[in-house]
Amino acid sequence: MRIVLLGAPGSGKGTQAVRLKSQLGVAHISTGDLLRAEVAAGTALGVKAKAVMEAGQLVSDDIMLGMLENRLAQPDAAGGFILDGYPRNLAQANALDALLVRIGQPLDMAVLLEVDNELLFQRLAGRAQAEGRKDDNPETVRERLRVYAAQTAPVVGYYRERGQLAALDGVGTLDEVYARIVAAVGARR
Ligand code: ADP
């Protein structure tokens, strides 16, 4: 299975992706994790990305596409993948389609976790206390939610128009939400 997981910051994408990856035996590709690894390693790319991430904005499409292409070329991605954090705007959605066609691995579906803004804000405030991620401070959280609404939300329509979207309620316990994802993915297998 080749799946794009969509949802705002705090929607639970990352947590659910980890579980789904084990169940499906595919690769979990989180572009946020890839970027944080570059930052931690102090690479040139990481140095560039750090300030952008801490401001809650999007790292450039060129950088992201190069990074994604490298990751998809690794052997574990050949058996399928869950993309978490990509695409984040329409240009990335188009670039992804072209890339996947080129490598002969077209997407099977996109799964959206829907959570309203107030709850997202609460969850991210909780995570800020628990994990201390630099981009979880209230000001940056607001900017990330704004960037999501302006740039990433249109990507939902992109997949809906192609008949590839499963829009799911992202509110509930982790198990409840996971069961909805498994049902939606099972229906397309
Ligand atoms: P969240 O979805 O919870 O905001 P992520 O870990 O997915 O967190 O991403 C953290 C940050 O990494 C984003 O705010 C953004 O700056 C950067 N980032 C991740 N994926 C992308 C992408 N596809 N395009 C541009 N920037 C990205």
Image (cartoon, rainbow, N blue to C red):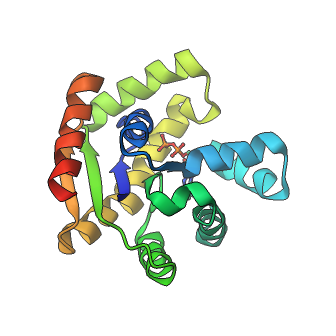
Q: How many numbered tags mark residues here?
A: 0
Quadrant including the N terminus:
bottom left
Left or right: 2, with 28 as reference point: left
Left or right: 30, with 163 as reference point: right
Q: Position of residue 116 (x, y in %)?
A: 24, 37
Residue at the top extreme of this rendering: 130
100 over 141 or under it: above or below: below
82 over 183 or under it: above or below: below
Q: Is 74 in front, or is 156? A: 74
Quadrant including the C terminus:
bottom left
Res. 136 image quadrant: top right
Left or right: 42, with 158 as reference point: right
Residue at image coords 71%, 48%: 51
Residue 171 visible from this viewpoint: no
Res. 181 image quadrant: top left
Residue at image coords 54%, 16%: 129
Q: Position of residue 120 (x, y in %)?
A: 34, 32
63 over 122 or under it: above or below: below
Q: Position of residue 149 (x, y in %)?
A: 35, 54
